[in-house]
Image: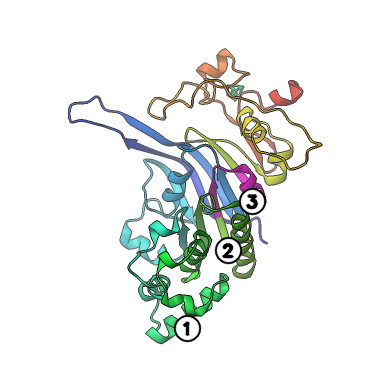
Amino acid sequence: MNQTQSLVSVQNVSKVFSANKGLFAKKKYVHAVNDISFEIRKGETFSLVGESGCGKSTTGRLIDHLLTPEKGQIFFEGKEISALDEKKMRPLRSEIQMIFQDPYGSLNPRKKIHELIGEPLLIHTKLSAGERLKKVHELLCEVGLRPEHAERFPHEFSGGQRQRIGIARALTVQPKLIIADEPVSALDVSIQAQVLNLLHDLQEKYDLTYLFISHDLSVVEMISDRIAVMYLGTIMETATRDELYDNPRHPYTKALLSAVPIADPTRKKSRIILKGDLPSPSNPPSGCLFHTRCPYCTEKCVKERPAVYTIKEDHQVQCHYPDILLEKGN
Ligand code: SF4
């Protein structure tokens, strides 16, 4: 795996949505993504993790060019894509594919599986109908289904099988990047592991790069090479998987990790309950966005947005006091 070459580079990107309810209502804006920067390296699984509404899915849609950022730039293989119009983006469309949480919602219930999987081949290739069907059969086998499944409709499959169909559909045009947005969160735990194993095997076979989006830190631990923790549209901490789980430095990461169940009954950990509710992204706090819930908040945290500190290579944290957890003996 080449972990040094950047496939995607996100630089100081912000996305704001208008949240106006009525014609004469005071203008309101939701700061969905707030000045984030990160890179996704070729061949890796880079995960975005955080609570619902933290901006991780919006970030995926910005990279997939379904949304346009207000500020900042997004590069794909060194080419800036954030400023491209849809026509100029079209040749790159097949290189970035998405897998969704609810594959049923993204599969037209009136179409047979061979039509659904064959659709991208029809759009992006010049294959004949026979060649497309052959490719569909190959892809179904690749994701653990059978060629005869091509003649069935989406409702004839279980949730796990439907997610396999979604993966086959994403693979049709040999993408370089797959953005998987909560791909296993609607599945039973045993099926989750099967789908994660499938994604892992396909990554090795096709040299795929994944942007994996999830709220579930135990799922993220299974599949990630590097992880970014998001809160209120901002990245609070980025680290390799082992570093993040063994040596978290941001109080928010620490709190999230404390809620992950551990299978070993001899290992005890105390859950950190954060005070207060998640602030509204339409009225984000001043200074450090986490200050209203942070047990270590100081006056400086209320007033100043923290810089991003590098703890070591591949470990950055956005906090005024990057050693605070070490000092407090956590
Ligand atoms: Fe907590 Fe202050 Fe660090 Fe923000 S900057 S995480 S409020 S200690």
Ligand 1 located in image quadrant: top right
- Is residue 221 on the magenta stretch? yes
232 horizontally vs 4: left or right: left
Residue type of the residue flagged with mark 3: Ser
> In front here: 227 or 106?
106
> In front here: 87 or 135?
135
> Who's the residue at 61% across and 64% down the image?
198
Residue position for label 2: 208
Residue 186 position in % (x across, y down): 51, 51
Vertical position of residue 129 compared to residue 213: above or below: below
Residue 235 position in % (x across, y down): 54, 37
Vertical position of residue 187 compared to residue 205: above or below: above
Quadrant containing the C terminus is top right
- Dot 2: element: loop
Residue position for label 3: 224
Q: Earlier in the sequence, mark 1 or mark 2?
A: 1
Residue type of the residue flagged with mark 2: Leu
> In front here: 264 or 322?
264
- Dot 1: element: helix
Q: Which residues are magenta?
A: 211-227
Q: Earlier in the sequence, mark 3 or mark 1?
A: 1
Residue type of the residue flagged with mark 1: Lys
Which mark lies nearer to you, 2 or 3? 3
Vertical position of residue 32 compared to residue 251: above or below: below
314 horizontally vs 12: left or right: right
Residue position for label 1: 134
